[in-house]
Image (cartoon, rainbow, N blue to C red):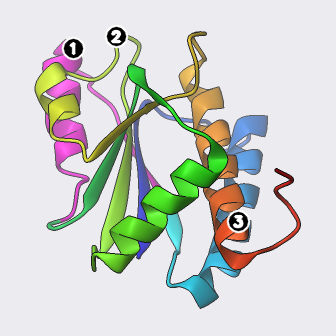
Amino acid sequence: MRVRIAAVGRLPARAPEAALVADYLTRFGQVGRGLGLGPATVAEVEDRRGGGRVAEAALLSRQIPEGAAIIALDERGRVLSSPDLAEALARFRDQGRPETACLIGGADGLHPPLREQADLVISFGAMVWPHMLVRVMLAEQLYRAATILAGGPYHRA
């Protein structure tokens, strides 16, 4: 099962966050290959016309493949443990989903109708995080989930 991070906004290629995302997604692909997970990619969208959440939702929706499981990152979502996220990914994979699309909205969050389409809505806690840092955190959690499913030593419970 492939994983796509669909995010509003562009991360400069030379940004330190971009290097971290690339590193964790490469690790995810390496560990996940034997588990039927990966590869993972990032799709960036940008509303240049200023249409707000509605326009961003339309752009993000185009990044969701047919039959994909949808994980929305939203401050109103559930706070999961890393093993819970690993279990959700395994469940989507075992359901035969071809891909999981992880959605990261813009500065004003996800448009509610798009958020309501999600199979799972998660939060990284009550604090507000910069969107570029959320990409890094999500990429690391995907890698961690793969290592949990593989029984590797990276995650210490």
Q: Nearer the viewer, residue 11 or 53?
A: 53
User: Between disc 1 and disc 2, whose residue precedes?
Assistant: 1
Location of residue 66 with respect to 128 vertically, above or below: below
Residue under label 2: 108
Q: Nearer the viewer, mark 3 or mark 1?
A: 3
Residue 129 location in percent, x, y?
60, 17
User: Between disc 3 and disc 1, whose residue precedes?
Assistant: 1
Residue under label 1: 52
Residue for point 65% across, 29% down: 133
Image mark for residue 144: none
Task: Indicate the secondary structure of the residue bearing disc 1.
Answer: helix
Q: Amino acid at mark 2?
A: Asp
Q: Nearer the viewer, mark 3 or mark 2?
A: 3
Q: Nearer the viewer, residue 68 or 150?
A: 150
Task: Indicate the secondary structure of the residue bearing disc 3.
Answer: helix
Q: Is residue 26 left or right of residue 2?
A: right
Q: Is residue 29 left or right of residue 157?
A: left
**Residues shaded magenta:** 42-65
Residue under label 3: 148
Residue 71 location in percent, x, y?
36, 45
Q: Are marks 3 and 1 in contact (CB under 8 Å)?
A: no
Task: Indicate the secondary structure of the residue bearing disc 2.
Answer: loop
